[in-house]
Every structure is written in structure tokens, then in C-alpha cells.
Amino acid sequence: MQIIERKQLREKPAGGTQLGFGHYFTDYMFTMKYTADKGWHDAKIEPNEPKPFDLATSIFHYAQGIFEGMKAFRQPDGSIAVFRPDENWARMNRSATRMCIPNFPEDVVEEGLEELLKLDRDWIPAEPGTALYIRPTIVATRVMLGVHASTEYLFFIILSPVGSYYAHGLEPTKLVVEDKYTRATIGGTGEAKCLGNYAASMKAGEEAEEKGFDQVLWLDANEKKYVEEVGSMNMFFVIGGEVVTPALVGSILPGITRKSCIQILKDKGYRVSERRISIDEVIAAQENGTLDEAFGTGTAAVISPVGLIRYRDKDYTINGGKMGAVTKMLYDTITGIQYGTAPDPYGWKKIIK
């Protein structure tokens, strides 16, 4: 694979939780092009620098683009671990199919990521709670106007050293149930990680933040009744000894952290249900004392306890506003695997020396 060296390396930020999320970017990036006559080609590592785009480039007008979120972790022996990258590549190609983007060769991209991480390994922070965030993205690059799938694309991977996704770290989040706006519907693009899904959620997210909440808890589009997901996380509820997460019905992103949590919970003997769960069931469980915990899962936040849910102007505190035992067990188990402080019995990590 071609590697174009950078003449002058960037100054690295101070490490630790003050990194925030998504503010700093490494020296290099992976790129690969697609054209109708050549397919995917010209895979290379090059300096991470701004790229010029014609204003008629189709991504700006029709949002034909997808992305993924992954993390690399520094291990105690100095090696690098990437958490379940094969799952991300598979999901990204499923998103590509939904958005009329040609599937990419996963082995080429995997090789590119490995070389990229070797070049930028000094950017991986070592402090607890930090990681190197990996953002693979595909955008349509044909210069044209007209609602048609592009015939040209750019695949790129950029890297960013990050701390906690939420400024308050592991403090329980506050959610507000959204029963006005809609994020996604069955038959739409909710299960694809495409650009437009996130733009569509911003209005509700902005209004939630103005009211002092961290995120929006979305309900289904048709009945405004069933819990779906949070903007950056899949949701779980611990109700009377049962761990419930909304079923993947076509409007919910099939989270990789979600999948990992379900596996861990089942292996530890928990009763796990993937089913439709109404917001009324959640509120009733809180009121009758059977809602023990609620938490969200995702690559960015890993596991985030939920301490409060507001629904129709009424606040419902969960587990006294504290992290619960199941939430803590999952957080400790997954982060232990990721950081190499606990065994990886599932073989979920790809190790790069």
C-alpha cells in the first residue's frame, strides 16, 4: 500500500479526559477512490489535510454518504487493540447497500487501518477512559445535480484522540422522551449509519440540550409509543430481573456494543429480551419499583447509565440517579477487554503490534 509521508508532524494535544470528543486529528488518513470503470482503487495512506471539493459534488446536495465509529486502545504491553472491527466493516457494507453505494473490499480497508494506526500510534492516549476514535466514511463525489446514485465515491478514515463522550464522564445521563419529532421509521434508513439520520435528529437534540438534558430518547414514528434508541446509543432497561432492549425492527441501528452486551449478559446468566417495549411500560415499572436500571450502549460512550427520564413534563429518577450493578458490570467487562486489563474470552480484539 502506498504511503505518502508528511513533511511536518502536527503538535499533539495534552492527554487525559480534557481531550473531549472529536476536537483533535492525527497526522495521517487512509483514502480510497471508486469510479464506475475501475471500481475501488488507489488505496493509500496520506497526510491528513483539507481536500478541495466542487460545490456541485453530489454529497453536498443529496447526502449519499455513510460512516462508522470505532476505537483503538493502547494495551499494557504497548500494542494496539481495535474492538470488533470486522463487525463495523460488515455493518458499513450493509449501510452502503441501503444507500446505493458499491460495497468495498473489507480486507483492503482493514489493511489500510492497520498501517494507519502504526503510523499514528503515538496519538493513542494512555490515560484511563481515553482512546483513539476511528471514523471510516464514504461520500459520493460525482460532480452533478440530479437525484441519482453517484458513480464516484471517496472512502476515507480519519483518527481522533478522545476522552469521554459526555463532559460529565460516567455520571448518569438525563434523557427527555421525544414525542414530537421523528428520527426514523420502518422502511426508512434508521438501521443504516447514514449521514442524513444524524442531521434529522439535531433539532430535537438542540431543544433537549436547551432544557438541560444530555440526549433525546426516541419513540417509534408510527404510534409514538415504543422506545427505540437514543441519538448516540442503544437502550437497555433492567425490569424485575429481566434485561430488555428494543428489538431491531428496521428503524434502529444494530449497535456493536449492544450486541456485545447481550452476549455478555446471556453468558453471565441474565434473562435478556429483545422486544418492543413501550414508554408506558418503562414509566409503570419506575412507578411500581421494578425498574432497577437503565443504560445506553455505543462506541462513543461505551456504557452510559441513565439517571433520569422526562416524559410529558414529568421527571422519573432511576435507581436514585446512580449507576446500577448491571450497568457497572457491563462497563467494567467491556472496558477491561478493550484496555487489556481483563481477558478477552470472545476474541473481540484485533491486536496490532
Image (spheres, rainbow, N blue to C red):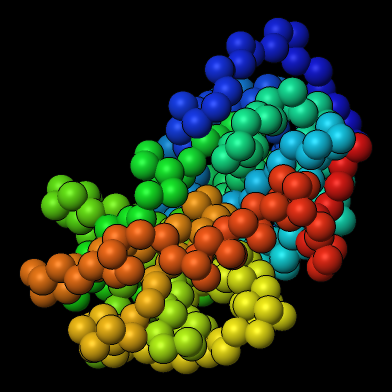
When the figure is inspected, residue 160 is found, relative to residue 332, above or below; the finding is above
Give the farthest residue toward the left. 313
Q: Is residue 156 visible?
A: no
Q: Nearer the viewer, residue 126 or 24?
A: 126
Looking at the image, residue 81 lies above or below residue 203: above
In the rendered view, does 286 fall on the left or right side of 292? left
> Left or right: where does residue 270 sit relative to residue 1?
left
Along the viewing direction, whichever of 147 and 67 lies nearer the viewer: 67
Q: Is residue 336 left or right of residue 105?
A: left
Q: Quadrant of the N terminus?
A: top right
- x, y percent for residue 84: 74, 60
Please say if 338 is above or below 75: below
Residue 94, x across and y down, in percent: 65, 71
Where does the image place residue 256, in percent across and percent down from the top left?
63, 66
Which residue sits at x=29%, y=69%? 318
Which one is nearer the viewer's eye here, 54 or 195?
A: 195
Q: Residue at 55% of width from left, 27% of height from top?
A: 16
Q: Position of residue 335 (x, y in %)?
A: 65, 52
- Vertical comparison of 312 with 242: above or below: above
Quadrant of the image containing the C terminus: top right
Q: Residue at x 57, y 40 (%)?
A: 129
Q: Would residue 26 be seen by someone viewing this image from the given angle?
A: yes
In this rendering, the count of numbered labels is 0
Residue drawn at 81 percent across, 18 percent down: 5
